Image (cartoon, rainbow, N blue to C red):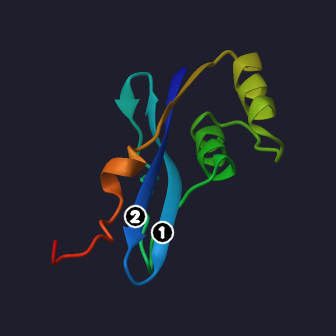
Amino acid sequence: MKIEIEWIEDYTDCELCGSSSANGADVKIDGQTWGYDMEPVAACYDGSSFNEWDVYRAIFAIAELEFVAGDTEDYKAQLEAAGHVVEETHTYPDYEAMRYDYGDDDE
């Protein structure tokens, strides 16, 4: 099984609440999008964030492997030892383009 993990982050900057970020992943298994929604949503309230543990736990369930908590390298090694290929990429937003403009509106 080929597992492609794109780690993604969402960011928001609220005038009232301040900045917020959230992490998540877009995962494809054998080229197909999987059934878990782990899209990060940064928000003042009720955002959603998923750490590596959440994502790998779901992947292990799909691969029908026993999940033992550890670190990312352990997870990858266990999956690869079971014959799976794991590819990871990271996508981060352009924070400067998303920052709220606190400038003076009168200018």
Q: Secondary structure at mark 1?
A: strand
Tag on residue 12? 2
Q: In which quadrant will I find the N terminus? A: top right
Q: Earlier in the sequence, mark 1 or mark 2?
A: 2
Using the image, determine if residue 7 lies above or below residue 49: above
**Location of residue 86 by image quarter:** top right
Q: Is residue 24 left or right of residue 60?
A: left
Q: In which quadrant will I find the C terminus? A: bottom left
**Location of residue 43 by image quarter:** bottom left
Question: 34 or 91, which is in the foreground?
Answer: 91
The reply to whether residue 97 is in sight is yes
Find the residue positioned furthest to the left: 106
Q: Secondary structure at mark 2?
A: strand
Residue depicted at 81% across the width and 32% down the height: 74
Cα separation between marks 1 and 2: 6 Å
Q: Is residue 104 left or right of residue 9?
A: left
Residue 3 in the image: state x and y as whole percent: 53, 25
Q: Residues within 10 Å of mark 1 (few under 14, many from 20)?
A: some
Q: Is residue 99 left or right of residue 74?
A: left
Residue depicted at 47% across the width and 75% down the height: 18
Q: Residues within 10 Å of mark 2 (few under 14, many from 20)?
A: some
Q: Are marks 1 and 2 in contact (CB under 8 Å)?
A: yes
**Which amino acid, by three-letter code, is at mark 1?**
Ser
Q: Is residue 93 left or right of residue 78?
A: left
Residue depicted at 50% across the width and 61% down the height: 21
According to the image, label 1 marks what residue?
19
Q: How many marks can you see?
A: 2
The reply to whether residue 41 is in sight is no
Residue 20 in the image: state x and y as whole percent: 49, 67
Residue 101 in the image: state x and y as whole percent: 29, 66
Tag on residue 10? none
**Which amino acid, by three-letter code, is at mark 2?**
Thr
